[in-house]
Amino acid sequence: MIGAEIQILIKILSKMPGLGPRSAKRLALFLLSDGEGQMDPMIAALQAARDNVSVCHVCGNLDTSDPCHICTDTRRDPGMLCVVAGIGDLWALERTGSFSGRYHVLGGILSAMDGVGPEDLRIEQLVRRVKEGTIEEIILALSATVDGQATAHYIADRLSGLHVKITKLAHGVPVGGELDFLDDGTIITALKSRA
């Protein structure tokens, strides 16, 4: 009963994080009925993002400039580098306004179950950045999951002997917790209480 174009839209929407088939149908219906005039602005925003947003070659963040605004901000401490698994984690930390250093996005975490090894992440780029000699402290802001902690241990081993202080988030981050889902207060406490 639903046209092919609508089915394709629902299928694409259902692949997005947090949307299942029922939510995708509701969103498709909202957009197609042009609820609150959102269809055209959404199309324009998607096209502008596709045409103008790229991955920062320095840190791995998404931005309209390369290097990104965080990497080029002279007010940030170039001696502090916060390592995160994904861009969502970077955005969660930035949302708190409590970190004034720079970032390195790994692009995921090590996971034997999912077949993600060190070569699949931006670990070698991190080692190169540390070898440049301007970084004094690495903050491993990885999730408190088994895979997150395994990734943190692997990175600490790779950076051993490079004369850089390595810390990780501490108090406030629950075991099994994902940074992107934590509240600002928890993230601020974890940053200030890192070990």
Image (spheres, grey):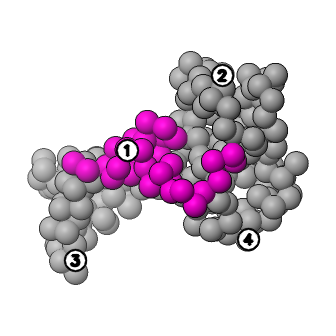
Q: Which residues are magenta?
A: 51-80
Position of the N terminus by quadrant:
bottom left
User: Mark 4 or mark 2, which has the lower sequence index?
Assistant: 2
- The CA distance from mark 4 to mark 2 is 32 Å
Label 4 sits on residue: 185
What amino acid type should be assigned to the residue bearing mark 2? Ala
Residue denoted by label 1: 66
Q: Disc 3 marks which residue?
A: 35
The Cα–Cα distance between marks 1 and 2, rounded to whole angstroms, is: 32 Å
Residue 20 percent coordinates (x, y): 42, 53
Between tags 4 and 3, which lies in front? 4
- The residue lying at 75 percent from left, 41 percent from top is 136
Nearer the observer: mark 3 or 2; the answer is 2
Say whether residue 100 is visible. Answer: yes
- The reply to whether callout 1 and callout 2 are in contact (CB within 8 Å) is no
* Mark 1 vs mark 2: in front: 1
Residue tagged 2: 112
Query: Who is closer to the viewer here, 42 or 8?
Result: 42
Taking the image as shown, residue 36 lies to the left or right of residue 3, namely right
Quick check: can you spot residue 146?
Answer: no
Query: Which one is closest to the eye, mark 4 or mark 2?
Result: 4
